[in-house]
Image: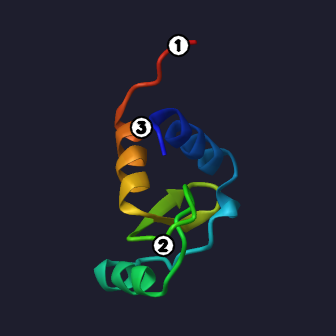
Amino acid sequence: MNTPSAVGLLHLIAAEPTLLPAAPHGAAGPDLTQRVGDGHLCLGCGKPAEAAVIVNSPIAGPRWLDLCSKCWFSVRRANDTPEQPA
């Protein structure tokens, strides 16, 4: 996943967080480890997820975001990069 795709994914999640499965309130390290072990696919590319992240949506509450390492890096980079004007 490249940075523009990651930015698009972040915008999609912000606009429609219910596309992500609900995560339990108060989930912590063991829950994240269990989620990765459950064998979910990366939302970015469809490969096996190696990272589970909780997105705290003010609209929909906590949601799971499952990503492979490459897509997780791209999403983190996109999230840390200020949006450039068009």
State the image quarter where residue 5 is shown.
Answer: top right
Give whichever of 10, 57 is nearer the camera. Answer: 10
Q: Which amino acid does label 3 sit on?
A: Ala
59 lies above or below 30: above
Disc on the earlier residue, 3 or 2: 2
Secondary structure at badge 2 equals loop
5 lies above or below 27: above
Q: In this view, does 37 lie to the left or right of 47?
A: left
Label 3 and label 1: CA atoms lie apart by: 14 Å
**Residue where numbered disc 2 is placed:** 48
Residue 70, horizontal then vertical, whole percent: 38, 54
Label 1 and label 2: CA atoms lie apart by: 34 Å
Disc on the earlier residue, 1 or 2: 2
**Residue where numbered disc 1 is placed:** 85
Secondary structure at badge 3 equals helix
Residue 25, horizontal then vertical, whole percent: 48, 77
Q: Residues within 10 Å of mark 1 (few under 14, many from 20)?
A: few
**Front position among marks 1 and 2:** 2
Label 3 and label 2: CA atoms lie apart by: 21 Å
Q: Given the current orientation, which residue lies at the most extreme front position?
A: 47
Query: Residue at point 55% right, 57% down?
Result: 45
Disc on the earlier residue, 3 or 1: 3
Q: Which amino acid does label 1 sit on?
A: Pro
Residue 33, horizontal then vertical, whole percent: 34, 82
Q: How crowded is mark 3: few (under 14 residues within 10 Å), some or many (20 or more)?
A: many
Give whichever of 77, 27 is nearer the camera. Answer: 77
Q: What residue type is labelled 2?
A: Pro
Query: Residue at point 47% right, 39% down?
Result: 2
52 lies above or below 15: below
**Residue where numbered disc 3 is placed:** 78
Q: Given the current orientation, which residue lies at the most extreme left position?
A: 29
9 lies above or below 39: above
